Image: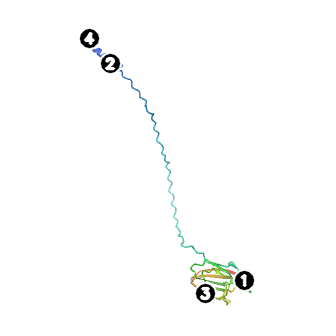
Amino acid sequence: MARVTTLYSVLALFVAFTLAGCGPAGTPEPPTPPQEATGAPSTPTPPPSEPTTAPNTPTPPPSEPTPSVEETPSPTSTPVPPMEISSTAFEDQGEIPPRHALCPDQENLSPPLDWSYVPPATESLALVCVDSAVGFVHWTIYNIPPTATGLIEGVPQLGDLEDGSLQGPNDYGEVGYGGPCPPPGDAHEYVFTLYALDTTLSLPAGADADTVLQAAEGHIIVQAQVAGLYALQ
């Protein structure tokens, strides 16, 4: 009997222990659901932004090299135009007015002459007028000052002139200018040649054309011409 009592006691203790583990206090609590976040909802991370810089511009192909141009050196001084001579009485190869002729009974005045662009190195000027058809000398004047720009109409028929110019004889045998006096027929050409010289001729007044031109040889810097025509009917 005592053995049965003991067995019951053990069973009672076992049951009590089991019930203690399954009772309200020992009942396992259900799992706690996940709590909602108490803070502000998290902002989703934006996708990476596109680059703000402009897309790469394709590199242009290298330009072709510019061919080098040979530079022309600039002149050190301005070129001087060639010396010129003209007359207000007639155009080049134009008709010489009768007042500048000797025949028939004309005024025999030397025509006005103008010139320009005399070279800076000029020391004196000389002028000779010749009938190109026959080589007849109509005027020889030399040692004209280099600053002169022309001759007036009707230069006096003197060997020494006020500006220092000197005159020689014409082929009529007179000093100074002698106008055209061709034979009747076709017009003759009268060529007025101006010479720029690099010296003053060491000649006295009265030197003829041949003497003047011989003395000027080797000293002529430049020369210029104008010609007129004259005919006797």
Disc 3 target residue: 212
Residues at badges 4 and 2 in contact (C-beta under 8 Å)? no
Number of marks in the image?
4
Which residue is rendered at x = 69% and y = 80% of the image? 228
Crowdedness of circle 4 by 10 Å Cα count: few (<14), some, many (20+)?
Answer: few
- Judged from the image, the secondary structure of the residue bearing numbered disc 3 is helix
* C-alpha separation, residue under disc 3 versus residue under disc 2: 164 Å
Residue ID for mark 2: 20
Residue at the image point whose x is 27% and y is 13% from the top: 9
- Find residue 81 and report its horizontal and vertical position in percent: 60, 75
Which one is closest to the eye, mark 4 or mark 2? 2
Callout 3–callout 2 Cβ contact below 8 Å: no
- Tell me the amino acid under the disc marked 2: Ala
Q: Which kind of residue does numbered mark 1 sit on? A: Arg
Residue placed most toward the observer, 48 or 151: 151
Mark 3 in CB contact with mark 4 (< 8 angstroms): no
State whether residue 186 appears in this view.
Answer: no
Q: Residue furthest bottom?
A: 173
**Residue with the most extreme front position:** 162
Q: Is residue 33 left or right of residue 191?
A: left
* Residue at the spot of label 1: 99
Q: Which residue is mark 4?
A: 5
Q: Residues within 10 Å of mark 1 (few under 14, many from 20)?
A: some
